[in-house]
Image: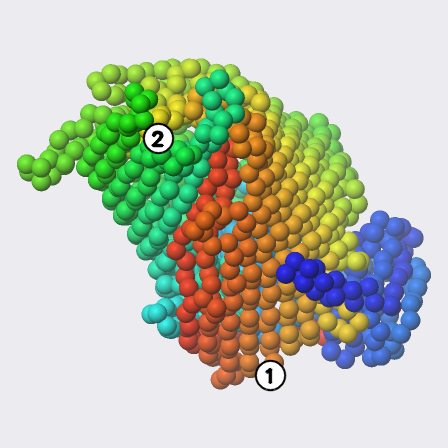
């Protein structure tokens, strides 16, 4: 299988190097100064098909590689503030050097307004990269996600759906500068049609403080803003879909949008029992059937999901823009699980031993959850120098779960140490209110001088009733005569838990420019947090048939208050290619902990003065090539349960006690990021490395008794560290035949040196995880799309204290997706994957072949789509996995969805006012 996919990859990539026509030249202004970031593009005269494009470098030089073309074409050169240069070409059959092209400055006449309908495919505006959506051809039924796949530097992982741009993560996707339901953009990608979009703007992701103050981004992530075509920013659009199939499987989705310039109203709803976390992406394409969150997403168990969402965005009056959304989600999941965990032990003197404890368990569970969220954001421009951003949120949720678990614990020789059975019922309610306010005030007469202030709060209340009816039998050879003493522990108990958390944060800072490139700032941050956890325990009273007998051993109370004061200073240096920022301060903590258990009251107050340091250095080597280095020193305080000597014996098999001598954790983290994207070759390289050192960490200190019971407390430990390195190379190639191929190669490695205590003895382990991935997208015109992929992952752990020197596992995943759009109105998709997991224990299946298939027919002017989908055609889906930790190995298997067929009908709704075809010829109005 591996060799097949490598050969497949090489066959499809080989034609990439057969392009033979090269066009090149140099762009200058009228004075002969090279113009960097000029857009040069080639389009056919007849139908304006894009044949190629390039961005000029620092010397103004550019190069386009294209295919042989016999039809007439235009070479166009575009730069903001200059007239567009246009050169007609009768044909393209040989290499051409256009030499020096001097652009003329654009003249502006008072009695003339120029409307330029044709824009270049790519334009660079200061720190923003802008793509013209009309230059990248997509199918009429494509969504935004399909459009982004066409853009150079954009990559969507086929297995996770994660979007990156030039190797950078994308935490925020906006529509006309505002969130669409949520800032991560999932709803926009899956549900907005590509034809709605005019431009895709890519810029560095900024924190709200950086955005309001105009500072450069300190992070290394990307924001995408989708601008809607102004001719389609009025009207209704959406889709509705319903399906039913074998085994009573069903899915129903609907989304309706009303856009009227600044006003946007969207309503979305979904219901399904096919494990689709959000099946709202079920548009007119079958391709979305198997995307992230689509049919059969592969999650554990069988889940019924219902959801409803409403989003409202508007500009109520000038400089006041609200965005409000409501979301409801409800789900019911059922799952059967079996697992095997082997925990390695250490001798009393710390030397290696063959001893281990093996836990075999089976369980069945059912969980029901309901959640309601109301989120808002209000962008207020007070005047030309002051701006405020307010983001309130409210969430209320309820979770109910029931479970039946049976497990046995044996030693390495199969001797039974304990066995248990447990029935549980948990019911919890949680309410959360949060709010964030950001304010920035600039000074008119001093560029770079500003005051920033922020305030945030988060208040939560949780109440829960947890029922447990268990029988645990311990087999302990106390006399070491080979005859175990049997001890039965029966529990029929109820724990009533109530907890609350209140967090308040405020910060104010003042920034002053020293000169044109250097800024200095001072600030003060204040934080006050309080938490409480009250747990009351009761045993079942056989006399009155209720939980009325107070259980002192599982009744306890813990709480804490934390006050943090952080004076800090910030230095920012902005040169042409260099951006450096460092923030240095000191956290002054007052940490109060209190608790009560078995009639004893506990109180512990500690004070700390801990340094804070964050630094970012970013160097732009050239356009499209940059290096970023980050360093961060952070600390974390222990929790009340880790500090206070309050004993938790809720679980008969696990006892937990705090340690008042714990100190805060300290860690150093450094990252290096290099990325390069070449617009001429449409290829990108991304390398990202991190290293973390735990100067001091908080770890579990466990003791495993001879009967298999676990006692846990906490200790400080120094010396753990980890490192990771990931790289990605991607390339987009327009082949001589006119077909398009995109491929990406990635390699990821993670290494960790783990330290801790098991059975009261110190252990150390070194874990190495490597993963390689090949992904190819090959589009044959608009008829066929082929997507082969292959992933190989390996995990290895080397142990120093165990007789078993190492443990390892590896996995293969080979996939092949094929979407066929021929004949007309027919869409057929097949998605196949072979998965293999090695080293699984006996009784766990190692491999499976998953095949999903669908056939769709568009009719009634492509407004309706009838579709037949078969999930897991060969009925081989499995839910097995292996995980390797620093103390042992776990194999597990969960319930998954198996084969079913579903029939669905989708209706596409589209009614725009004043629509105008995109890409019309330029016009001039006098």
Q: Quadrant of the C terminus?
A: bottom right
Res 823 label: 1
Percent position (x, y) of residue 744?
Answer: 69, 56
Label 1: few (<14), some or many (≥20) within 10 Å? few
Q: Is residue 894 left or right of residue 839?
A: left
Tell me what residue is drawn at x 58 percent, y 56 percent: 813
Tell me what residue is drawn at x 64 percent, y 74 percent: 784
Q: CA distance from mark 2 to mark 1?
A: 65 Å
> Residue at label 2?
708
Q: Nearer the viewer, residue 75 or 833?
A: 833
Query: Looking at the image, can residue 241 be seen?
Result: yes
Outermost front residue: 481
Quarter of the figure with residue 75:
bottom right
Outermost left residue: 543
Q: Quadrant of the N terminus?
A: bottom right
Q: Is residue 30 left or right of residue 229?
A: right
Image vertical order of residue 472 relative to residue 525, above or below: below
Q: Nearer the viewer, residue 294 or 354?
A: 354
Report the coloring of the rendering. Answer: rainbow
């Amino acid at each position: 299988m591996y060799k097949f996919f490598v050969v497949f990859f090489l066959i499809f990539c080989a034609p990439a190097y057969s392009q033979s026509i090269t066009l090149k030249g140099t762009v200058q202004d009228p004075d002969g100064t090279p113009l960097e970031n000029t857009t040069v593009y080639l389009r056919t005269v007849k139908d304006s098909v894009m044949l190629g494009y390039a961005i000029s470098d620092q010397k103004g030089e550019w190069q386009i590689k294209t295919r042989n073309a016999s039809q007439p074409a235009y070479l166009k050169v575009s730069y903001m503030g200059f007239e567009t240069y246009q050169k007609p070409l009768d044909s393209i059959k040989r290499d051409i050097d256009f030499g020096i092209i001097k652009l003329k400055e654009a003249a502006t006449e008072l009695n003339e307004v120029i409307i330029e309908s044709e824009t270049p495919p790519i334009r660079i505006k200061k720190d923003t990269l802008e793509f013209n959506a009309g230059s990248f051809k997509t199918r009429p039924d494509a969504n935004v996600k399909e459009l982004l796949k066409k853009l150079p530097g954009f990559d969507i992982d086929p297995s996770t759906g994660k979007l990156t741009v030039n190797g950078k993560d994308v935490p925020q996707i906006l529509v006309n500068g505002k969130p669409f339901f949520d800032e991560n953009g999932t709803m926009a990608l899956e549900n907005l049609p590509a034809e709605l979009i005019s431009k895709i703007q890519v810029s560095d992701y900024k924190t709200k403080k950086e955005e309001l103050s105009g500072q450069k981004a300190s992070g290394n992530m990307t924001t995408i803003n989708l601008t809607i075509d102004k001719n389609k920013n009025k009207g209704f659009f959406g889709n509705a879909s319903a399906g039913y199939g074998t085994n009573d499987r069903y899915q129903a989705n609907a989304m309706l949008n009303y856009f009227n310039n600044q006003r946007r109203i969207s309503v979305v709803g979904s219901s399904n029992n096919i494990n689709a976390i959000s099946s709202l992406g079920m548009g007119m394409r079958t391709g979305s059937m198997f995307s992230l969150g689509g049919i059969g997403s592969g999650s554990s168990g069988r889940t019924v999901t219902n959801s409803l969402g409403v989003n409202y965005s508007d500009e109520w009056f000038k400089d006041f823009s609200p965005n409000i959304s409501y979301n409801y989600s409800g789900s019911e999941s059922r799952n059967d699980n079996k697992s095997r965990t082997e925990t390695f032990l250490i001798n009393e003197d710390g030397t290696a031993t063959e001893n281990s404890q093996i836990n075999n368990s089976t369980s069945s569970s059912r969980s029901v959850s309901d959640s309601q969220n109301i989120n808002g954001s209000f962008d207020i421009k007070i005047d030309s120098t002051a701006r405020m951003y307010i983001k309130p949120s409210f969430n209320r949720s309820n979770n109910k779960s029931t479970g039946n678990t049976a497990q046995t614990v044996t030693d390495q020789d199969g001797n039974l140490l304990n066995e248990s059975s447990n029935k549980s019922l948990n019911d919890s309610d949680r309410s959360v209110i949060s709010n964030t306010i950001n304010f920035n005030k600039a000074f008119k007469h001093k560029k770079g001088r500003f005051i920033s202030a922020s305030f945030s709060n988060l208040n939560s209340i949780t109440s829960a009733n947890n029922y447990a009816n268990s029988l645990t039998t311990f087999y302990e050879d106390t006399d070491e005569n080979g005859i175990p003493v049997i001890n039965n522990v029966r529990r029929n108990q109820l724990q009533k838990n109530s907890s609350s958390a209140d967090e308040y944060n405020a910060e104010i800072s003042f920034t002053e420019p020293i000169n044109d490139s250097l800024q200095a700032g001072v600030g003060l941050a204040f934080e006050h947090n309080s938490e409480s956890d009250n747990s009351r325990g009761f045993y079942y009273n056989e006399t009155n048939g209720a939980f009325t007998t107070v259980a002192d051993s599982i009744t306890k109370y813990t709480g804490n208050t934390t006050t943090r004061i952080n004076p800090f200073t910030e230095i920012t240096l902005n040169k042409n290619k260099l951006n450096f920022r460092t923030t240095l301060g000191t956290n002054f903590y007052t940490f109060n902990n209190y608790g009560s258990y078995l009639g004893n009251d506990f109180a512990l107050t500690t004070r700390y003065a801990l340094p804070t340091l964050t630094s970012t250095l970013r160097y732009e080597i050239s356009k499209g090539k940059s290096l970023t280095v980050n360093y961060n020193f952070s600390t974390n305080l222990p929790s009340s349960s880790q500090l206070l000597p309050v004993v938790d014996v809720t679980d008969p098999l696990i006892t937990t006690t705090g340690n008042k001598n714990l100190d805060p954790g300290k860690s150093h983290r450094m990252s290096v990021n290099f990325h390069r994207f070449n617009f001429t070759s449409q290829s990108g390289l991304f390398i990202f490395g991190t290293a973390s050192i735990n100067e001091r960490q908080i770890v579990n200190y466990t003791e495993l008794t001879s009967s298999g019971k676990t006692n846990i407390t906490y200790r400080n430990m120094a010396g753990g560290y980890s490192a990771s390195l990931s790289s990605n190379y991607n390339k987009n190639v327009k082949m001589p035949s006119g077909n398009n191929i995109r491929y990406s190669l990635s390699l990821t490695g993670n290494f960790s040196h783990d330290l801790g205590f098991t059975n009261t003895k110190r252990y150390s382990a070194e874990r190495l995880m490597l993963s390689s991935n090949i992904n190819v997208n090959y589009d044959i015109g608009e008829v066929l799309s082929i997507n082969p992929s292959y992933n190989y992952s390996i995990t290895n752990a080397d142990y120093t204290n165990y007789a078993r020197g190492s443990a390892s596992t590896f996995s293969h995943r080979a996939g092949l997706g094929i979407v066929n759009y021929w004949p007309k109105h027919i869409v057929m998709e097949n998605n196949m994957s072979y998965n293999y997991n090695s080293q699984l224990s006996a009784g766990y299946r190692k491999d499976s072949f998953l095949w999903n298939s669908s056939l769709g027919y568009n009719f009634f002017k492509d407004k309706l789509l009838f579709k037949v989908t078969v999930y897991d055609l060969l009925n081989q889906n499995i839910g097995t996995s292996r995980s390797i930790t620093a103390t042992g190995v776990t194999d597990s298997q969960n319930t998954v969805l198996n084969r079913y067929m579903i029939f669905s009908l989708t209706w596409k709704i589209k009614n725009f006012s004043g629509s105008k075809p995109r890409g019309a010829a330029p016009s001039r109005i006098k």
